[in-house]
Image (spheres, rainbow, N blue to C red):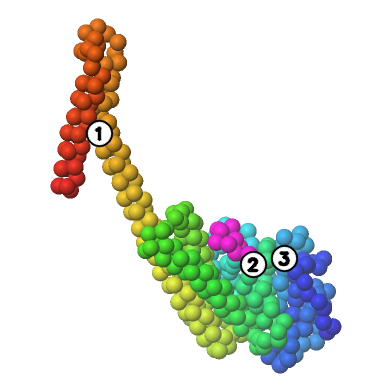
């Protein structure tokens, strides 16, 4: 087949890229939707060959083409429109249906930067479909273009899961670097980070963990009763990839707890600063109480105000105010020394 330059655009069928792969192939051969249809309709095949077709679901023709020519089960199309998008791999009609969550290329710790990838995996065919460009599937795409050998369709799925774990680990390292900087500032007493930033990071990590963690029950059923066409090596690699992913998710959980402790520490510091400010305000109020009371009484403009006609009345009242203020100051100082 003639090599085709594959870009992020899609052809008239919504195909973003397509490749013919196999254990005996030195390099993957690119194909368009017309060539893919000819191959699916019975073009000459070699043992172990399979094709990988990646579709853009934002293209109106993608789902129509898949329903007409891909031979996918109804459950695959049902998952495209389901509200639940947690990561899972299930066996349906002797083929694998996978829902995989991934992050966008420009991931910036925002919950909206997480999107879903759907896969249908059969012995001779891998269908992947998404609505927005995603990072892990692009890593897999680049590996295929570099000529990395993939002996089976399940190995391509395993490669994708490992790429997803690598992307998640990179996100965790980036988050750890941010948390380290905040923690260093906190220990140095210079923290000015908003708790909202830590809260947003924590919410994104929680959503990543919830969406990316494969459903244990579905994966366990698949590993215990794999389809007959899946080799023992494929089953073992799938089990290993799930274990590797579990390690990454454990790191995510640890980071969430660390962020939670930082939030509590920042909240404690803010409460302490607020309490200190209220204490100072209370002292100022107590010290200003005598002059406020006396000034209020003398400012009532009623008859009988003492010292109103005395030539030194102002200085006498000032001395009284100073005396009461000094007494209040001594009382506050003694209370503070007891604390």
Q: CA distance from mark 2 to mark 3?
A: 16 Å
For marks 2 and 1 on the same chain, the one whose residue lies earlier in the sequence:
2
Q: CA distance from mark 1 to mark 3?
A: 72 Å
Residue at 27% over, 8% down: 302
Name the residue beneath numbered marker 2.
105
Foreground: disc 2 or disc 1? 1
Does dot 1 land on a helix, a strand or a loop?
helix
Mark drawn on residue 287: 1
Q: Give residue 186's quadrant in the image.
A: bottom left
Name the residue beneath numbered marker 3.
56
Neighbor class of circle 1 (other Cα within 10 Å; few <14, some 14-19, many 20+) is many
Does dot 3 land on a helix, a strand or a loop?
strand
The x and y percentages for residue 94 are 61, 77
Residue at 77% over, 87% down: 45
The x and y percentages for residue 82 are 59, 59
Instruction: Answer above or below: position of 198 versus 251.
Output: above
Q: Which residues are magenta?
A: 104-116
Q: Is residue 106 magenta?
A: yes
Residue at 30% over, 16% down: 299
Q: Is residue 79 visible?
A: no
The x and y percentages for residue 227 are 57, 81
Residue at 74% over, 85% down: 28
């Amino acid at each position: 087949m003639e090599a085709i330059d594959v870009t992020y655009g899609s052809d008239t069928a919504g195909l973003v890229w397509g490749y013919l792969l196999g254990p005996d192939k030195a390099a993957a051969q690119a194909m368009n939707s017309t060539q893919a249809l000819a191959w699916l309709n019975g073009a000459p095949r070699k043992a172990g060959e399979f094709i990988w077709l990646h579709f853009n679901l934002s293209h109106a023709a993608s789902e129509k083409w898949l329903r007409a020519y891909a031979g996918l089960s109804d459950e695959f199309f049902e998952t495209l429109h389901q509200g639940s998008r947690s990561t899972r791999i299930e066996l349906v009609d002797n083929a694998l249906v996978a829902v995989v969550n991934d992050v966008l290329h420009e991931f910036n710790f925002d919950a909206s930067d997480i999107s879903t990838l759907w896969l249908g995996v059969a012995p001779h065919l891998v269908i992947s479909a998404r609505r927005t460009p995603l990072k892990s599937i692009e890593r897999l795409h680049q590996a295929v273009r570099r000529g990395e050998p993939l002996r089976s369709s399940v190995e391509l799925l395993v490669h994708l899961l490992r790429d997803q774990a690598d992307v998640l680990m990179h996100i965790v390292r980036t988050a750890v670097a941010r948390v380290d900087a905040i923690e260093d500032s906190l220990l140095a007493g210079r923290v000015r980070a908003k708790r909202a930033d830590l809260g947003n990071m924590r919410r994104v990590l929680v959503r990543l963990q919830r969406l990316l963690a494969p459903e244990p029950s579905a994966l366990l059923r698949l590993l215990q009763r794999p389809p007959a066409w899946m080799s023992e090596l494929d089953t073992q690699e799938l089990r290993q990839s799930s274990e590797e992913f579990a390690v990454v998710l454990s790191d995510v959980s640890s980071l969430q707890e660390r962020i939670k402790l930082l939030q509590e520490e920042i909240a404690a510091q803010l409460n302490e600063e607020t309490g200190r400010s209220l204490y100072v305000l209370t002292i100022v109020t107590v010290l200003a109480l005598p002059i406020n009371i006396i000034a209020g009484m003398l400012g009532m403009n009623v008859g009988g105000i003492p010292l109103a006609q005395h030539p030194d009345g102002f200085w006498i009242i000032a001395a009284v105010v100073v005396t009461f203020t000094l007494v209040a100051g001594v009382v506050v100082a003694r209370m503070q020394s007891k604390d």
